[in-house]
Image (tube, grey):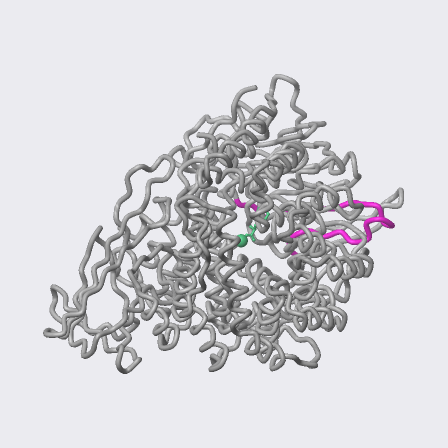
Amino acid sequence: MTEPQPVYLKDYQPPAFRITHTELKFDLAPSNTRVTALLHLERHPDSQPGLPLILDGEKLSLQRIAIDGQELQEGEYRLDAETLTIEDAPDRLRLETEVEIDPAANTALEGLYLSNGMFCTQCEAQGFRRITYYLDRPDVMATFSTTVIGDREQLPVLLSNGNPVERGELPNGKHFATWEDPHPKPSYLFAVVAGSLEKVEDHFTTMSGREVLLQIWVEPENLDKTEHAMRSLKAAMVWDEQTYGREYDLDLFMIVAVNDFNMGAMENKGLNIFNSAAVLTHPQTATDAAYQRVEGVVGHEYFHNWSGNRVTCRDWFQLSLKEGFTVFRDQSFSADMNSAPVKRIEDVSYLRTAQFAEDAGPTAHPVRPDHYIEISNFYTLTIYEKGSEIVRMLRNLLGWDTFRQGSDLYFARFDGQAVTIEDFVGCMAEVSGLDLTQFMLWYSQAGTPEIDAHGEYDYAKAEYHLTLRQRTPATPGQPNKQPLHIPVRIGLVGTKSGEDLALTLNGSQGKQSLSEGGVLHLREAEQTFVLSDVAEAPVPSLLRGFSAPVKLRFPYGREDLSFLLQHDVDGFNRWDAGQRLAMLALDDLIAAHRNGVEKVMDVRLTEAFRGLLTAPEEDQAVLAEMLTLPSEAYIAEQQPVVDVDAIHAARVFVKQSLAVALRDEFLAIYQANQSDAVYAPSAEQIAQRSLKNVALSYLMSIEDERGVELAQQQFEAGHNMTDVRAALTLLVHSSRSDIAEPALRAFGEKWAHDPLVMDQWFSIQVTRPQPDALDRVKYLMAHPAFSLKNPNRVRALIGAFVNQNRINFHRLDGEGYELLADVVIKLNKLNPEIAARIITPLTRWRRFDEQRQALMKAQLERIRAEDLSPNVFEIVEKALA
Ligand code: PHE
Ligand code: ZN
């Protein structure tokens, strides 16, 4: 077998041909769907004359091919596993092909596939080539006209992009629908859906008065789960008009919920396809977190209509052009809809655990990679989340108004085009007059920059000297890094007044007031900033709002952190001070555990928590975040060698110590936040529930009788899934099977019919810290509700175990690793995209002790010996390199 070869950004060439219009006909049948394509092709004006016409196509069975009505004979075209080549194509032609495909056999869920008897497509990034022969690249944009033919009884609903223009009956119990999409689009935004679906409708009037019909299509049993998605959609449409001046551009906007889907959702023009988990909600079945995810994803896909669809990517190396910008837009939308500081805390926590870990591992890559083997491996936290942070830095560097001007310019100038990251940043530079040359390194350099900060207060001169040293560690293929342009937002908090001091920067151009935001521009490897007229000794508050995606170290003492926790006006940094304080305590306890020394709780942490509990924050949502200890995954990120057991033991010890010392306070918080209000996913209610459930988790950490009683009551009262799930998790994660088993059984029986709830049932069990967790995973893999073919099931059962049950996945007998490798080997054949994602924890083997390293590596080698998909091949090669 020949090894899959990488594609390089530097080899980009414009296409030899372009397609002005695409006419498609689908005759749907589970095992032999017939796709007829008529492509209006012409030679690209910028291409070299005489180049052959090379179309992409995979897993297609060609039935017929004709140019301008003339059938081609064998020898007039060439076929291989991935292409169809026509050597002497005319400069302008109509190419007609007819292929047969097998949706029923498509377990990779790329191209046209079947999900619960419903036909649907997934074309990003390169799925369209599994539907028909095409120039399957984002810089080829065409208008589409699509006719879908299907069985009238089984497939009453036939959807595609754009506007419905015709429908009618056909012989043999069939019917058809024809759709036209007037907006030129790349093939990755194409979609077809056909099935027995029902819809919920609503209307939206755009800012210029266009009436838009909104539809959410679901299986009949889910009709009562669409309300929140519809509300979120309308909110997103208003928000994008008000915030970015972006208006919707068709008369119809559709969302379809699909059970089998590799990702969260897909922004197909006018016909967004969603993983059912990212669209369906009901108070009895979905948690607050799920409601918020739905709002975020609905917003995300809707916002793509401009940042992605109207203006798209020239090539897949530019993926973050649409994803980074769109994540930034959806994060801002969610922040505006809910508690903004909590949204920021959640996004940063995620980035710092998951994306930083990616940046520190063997698959680290720049936000704009310069090569790839399999593009679907690059839908990563780096492209999405770090990409969003880069856009956020631009917003912060330019200020909102100028940033918005840059955004307007970008959309106006490049509407209908496929462009690059330079085009986007270029607009920002043009409207602001800023030189963003150094800033562009954020896109090309992988790895998380580290800043060592050091401060000195000079009483005599009333000056504060802040020295910042930056370095970015080496990543695969990038041994040497250059200094980045890093915006570091700061404040100085007076130790006497407890208030922010005015900031005057003493630079080469004299004194400059930093009052607007207090952003320092770190550009050199090392820079000292002199702040003058500092009237009292300050504690610095650094990287406020997490102004750049970096690791910042500063030798804070525990007093400093307790002080910031109380006084910092920046909500994010107040939270971060608490996390840093907890980390100091955890570090000592991890060392104690490792050295076999008795563990002693840090009283300053207890007192800080007492302060939080007794003089509650105004923002209850932020308080709940502050009471949450750093996760095991985050703690692990801070350790040079990850000691799984010590981390777990230390965290449990801190949690239990706090619960013992502050039992009454937690109980009071629990009681104060009980409510009988009708469920609403409002910011206030969500804050109340999270505060109440955090408090309960402390009480249950010591399995306090009162706590057990409250958890049982809360579970049985069953007000909403947020409370039920929180209580069930605490019962099941406890050491007492007498309280765990009955609850688990009751829940499993009650929800056996609802796959999204059963996913929660799977996750709760396999994340329990008890030593039987791995056996449960094996047992549940044989459960009738589980299937390796469904990505949500795989994530709920296997993903939850390997990512969120660290002590059991990393068992010293290596069984956790073996189980994951077994799953990867099976998924490699069924669904390579999911296989290549689920393997992630094994790729991080270098972070652990020698014994675990050897065990993990052995499993990676076992996987490598298989006949691998390009997806898994690329990841395993990098992991073992
Ligand atoms: N483009 C989708 C999004 O970000 C994600 C996606 C990628 C979905 C590839 C499916 C396949 O919203
Ligand atoms: Zn996206």
Image quadrant of residue 232? bottom right
Image quadrant of residue 718? bottom right
What main secondary structure does the magenta stretch of the protein show?
A: strand
Q: Is residue 697 above or below residue 114?
A: below
Residue 39 in magenta stretch: no
Q: Is residue 201 above or below residue 617?
A: above
Q: How many marks?
A: 0
The x and y percentages for residue 663 are 57, 74
Start-end of magenta stretch = 141-162
Q: Is residue 154 above or below residue 60?
A: below
Residue at the (16%, 66%) spot, across then down: 530
Q: From this viewpoint, is residue 762 visible?
A: yes
Quarter of the picture containing the C terminus is top left
Q: Is residue 124 left or right of residue 751?
A: left
Closer to the camera in the image, 186 or 6: 6
Q: Is residue 319 left or right of residue 254?
A: left
Q: Is residue 492 above or below residue 878?
A: below
The x and y percentages for residue 9 are 40, 37
Residue at the (60%, 54%) spot, across then down: 269
The x and y percentages for residue 373 are 49, 33
Image quadrant of residue 498? bottom left
Closer to the camera in the image, 775 or 793: 775
Closer to the camera in the image, 729 or 29: 729
Q: From this viewpoint, is residue 323 visible?
A: no
Q: Is residue 750 left or right of residue 437?
A: right
Closer to the camera in the image, 20 or 331: 331
The x and y percentages for residue 366 are 39, 44
- Toward the top, the furthest residue is 75
Q: Is residue 578 left or right of residue 874?
A: left
